[in-house]
Image (spheres, rainbow, N blue to C red):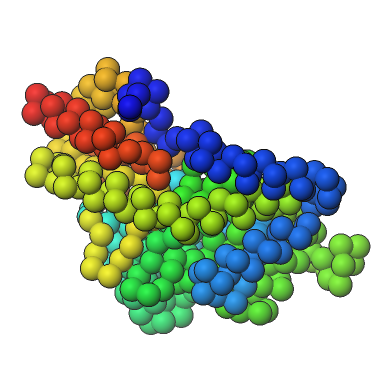
Amino acid sequence: MVNIWNMQFRDLKRQYLALQADIDSAIKEVISSTVFIMGNPVVELEETLAQYVGVRHCVACANGTDALVIALKVWGVGEGDAVFVPDFTFFASAEAVSAVGATPVFVDVDGKTFNINTLDLETKIAETFAIGRLRPKVILAVDLFGLPANYHALQQIANKYQLKVLEDAAQGFGGGIDTRKACSFGDIATTSFFPAKPLGCYGDGGALFTNSDEWATLARSYRMHGKGDNKYDNVRIGMNSRLDTLQAAILKVKFKAFANYELDAVQQIAKRYTDNLHTMVQTPFVPQGFTSSWAQYTIVLDDENHRNNLQNSLKTSAIPSMIYYPKPIHEQAAYGTMVDKPTGCPIAERLCRTVLSLPMHPYLEIDEVDMISAEVAKAISSL
Ligand SMILES: *Cc1c(COP(=O)(O)O)cnc(C)c1O
């Protein structure tokens, strides 16, 4: 029986109950080993994930934000450099750019995929070159809500202007394009193991992926105080950004479930939502050949009132929903004094007023999806 009164937006408790025996024993094993930092599970996890993604190197670190910072440091990106960032994403995508002293240039997104808009990207690159104050260096593309960005087009633009591509796959782990997996598209890619992400741990965690031996070595140095031959040989100013052994051990257990059945389960759930809802509301668009890992299932309403009314109706029926994201990044107070205000990101602004994310996780039952859909349908028909 489905208990709607306990419905969670992302039910981590159900996942834990399904995996409890293995997770508990993995945790106990780490505690008995007392190797809490850089224990064997960290290296084993890195090897497993690199193989799954299909790249040479995975470098685990403390969180997805640090993974972005480390990638930018590896490339020497800093003051005077422009990094092109979608205006509709989680704040960390831009924050990492500012953290290394570079300047984010905000780019509008696509109204159907929610990912970086390649037409506006070329406009913003051309503008940045024309103004001449910043050096264009990196396209930071986000695999928003689990759907990979349009890397085929992005790579062509990167080649044309000699830019690097950084793939922020914090929400995208497990997605793909044709036979290639997310985290393999950027020159460097990053992900996050924050608990609510597609592959989450029991705290903070992150990782960086690359085929470059040189960049992987630099990333391993940056995550451990700029180490040279060892931790006490410091050849650059680095950070303290490692993944705890406990988190790696938990992730090893969770990755098996993720690859064996969770990723399939979210495909079924997303399909059911779309079958139920596509005639009454804009449902997520997944281009031909693309696979989403469904970090979020996000619908778009006609206007802000409809969106807010729908959210309130769902709340009355004890159905949780979230607004990802309520503000475009360029409107965040932290960027309020920014010199380079964007020339406009109208699609990002509209989406912030009209999107609503529905409960989504691999342990959601089809009955529950139908029940949520019925409540959405009822609310929309009375808007
Ligand atoms: C969550 C997230 C991050 C940051 O990851 P943390 O592990 O929370 O630091 C970066 N970018 C995007 C798009 C995210 O969703």
Residue at the spot x=33%, y=73% of the render? 178
As drawn, 106 above or below 229: above
Q: Quadrant of the C terminus?
A: top left
Q: Is residue 173 visible?
A: no
On screen, residue 228 versus residue 345, left or right, reads right
**Residue 335 shows in this picture:** yes
Q: Is residue 303 left or right of residue 252?
A: left
Q: Quadrant of residue 309?
A: top left
Q: Residue at x 62, y 42 (%)?
A: 21
Looking at the rendering, which quadrant does residue 118 occupy? bottom left
Residue 146 as seen in the image, left or right of residue 344: right
Picture mark count: 0
Q: Along the line of sight, which residue is nearer the eye, 149 or 72?
A: 149
Residue 98 pos. (x, y %): 56, 53
Is 213 situated above or below 366? below
Furthest residue in direction right, as rendered: 232
**Is 41 placed above or below 290 here?**
above
Depth order, front residue of 183/350: 183
Locate the N terminus and report the quarter of the image it occupies: top left
Front position in the image: 47 or 380: 47
Q: Residue furthest top?
A: 316
Residue 190's spot in the image, x, y percent?
Answer: 54, 61
Location of residue 155 in the rendering, given as x and y in whole percent from the top left corner: 39, 77
| Residue 215 x/y as whole percent | 65, 74
**Against 120, is 263 above or below?**
above
Q: Nearer the viewer, residue 374 or 146?
A: 374
| Residue that appears at 24% across and 51% down | 271
Residue at x 33%, y 31% (from the top left corner): 321
